[in-house]
Image (cartoon, grey):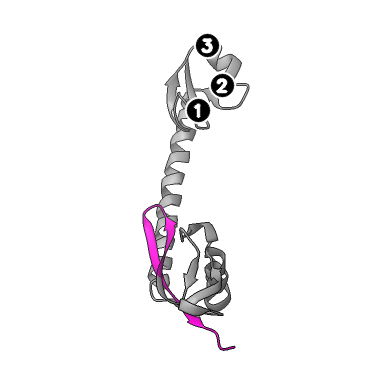
Amino acid sequence: MQVLLLKNVPGLGSAGQIKKVTEGYARNFLLPRKLAVFASDGAVKQSEAIKEAAVRRETKTRGEAEELADILKQISLTFRAKAGEGDRLFGSITAGDISEALAREKRITVDKRKIELPNPIKELGVKQVEIKLHGDVTATVTVVIEKASV
């Protein structure tokens, strides 16, 4: 029996693929859980339309990410923080702080999880922070940490 997968099924395939499975597996597992439908001509055409729409959406999203990357590459964010001896900060600058600063100062919304900052910034100076926007589209933002006047 051939089925069209509606969702990714571990060990079988990904959404949109047509797979040959046993009747029992289809009727008792895949169909009741709405993981697949019978592979009729109409279902196959619908699957192809969904794939084409996904490709168009992916292309559009990638183009928007590349435009945003061009904008972000020109941005420099400045943070003023209290620091002690050896230019160590009392506290740190996190990905959340960078995301908030982008939203507040530049009106650009970037999810803090997309900011590649393995450890919070804890010293004064200039840092290059990478932001992963989409797949392999990344942008580098300059972050300047200055000593706050007391």
Q: CA distance from mark 1 to mark 2?
A: 9 Å
Q: Left or right? Give the position of 50 relative to 70.
A: right
Disc 3 target residue: 23
Q: What is the secondary structure assignment of the residue under circle 1?
A: loop
Residue sticking out furthest to the bottom: 149
Residue 40 or 105: which is nearer the viewer? Answer: 105
Q: Which-is-in-front pick, marks 1 and 2?
A: 1
Task: Name the spot of residue 139 as percent of width and height, x first.
Answer: 39, 65
> Which secondary structure lies at badge 3?
helix
Determine the residue positioned at 52% across, 72% down.
Answer: 102
Q: Is residue 57 above or below residue 21?
A: below
Q: Secondary structure at mark 2?
A: helix
**First to last magenta residue range:** 128-150
Residue at which label 2 appears: 30
Instruction: Report if residue 78 is visible in the image.
Output: no
In x, y percent, where is residue 141? 42, 71
Q: Residue most toward the front?
A: 85
- Residues under numbered marks 1 and 2 in contact, where contact means CB atoms less than 8 Å apart: yes
First along the sequence among labels 1 and 3: 1
Is residue 81 positioned above or below 108 on the image?
below
* Residue 62 part of the magenta segment: no
Instruction: Residue at 56% x, 69% y: name it.
Output: 97
- The residue that mark 1 highlights is 9
Which residue is most to the right?
A: 32
Give the camera-side residue of 105 and 83.
83
Q: Amino acid at mark 3?
A: Glu
Viewer-nearest of labels 1 and 3? 1
Amino acid, disc 1? Val
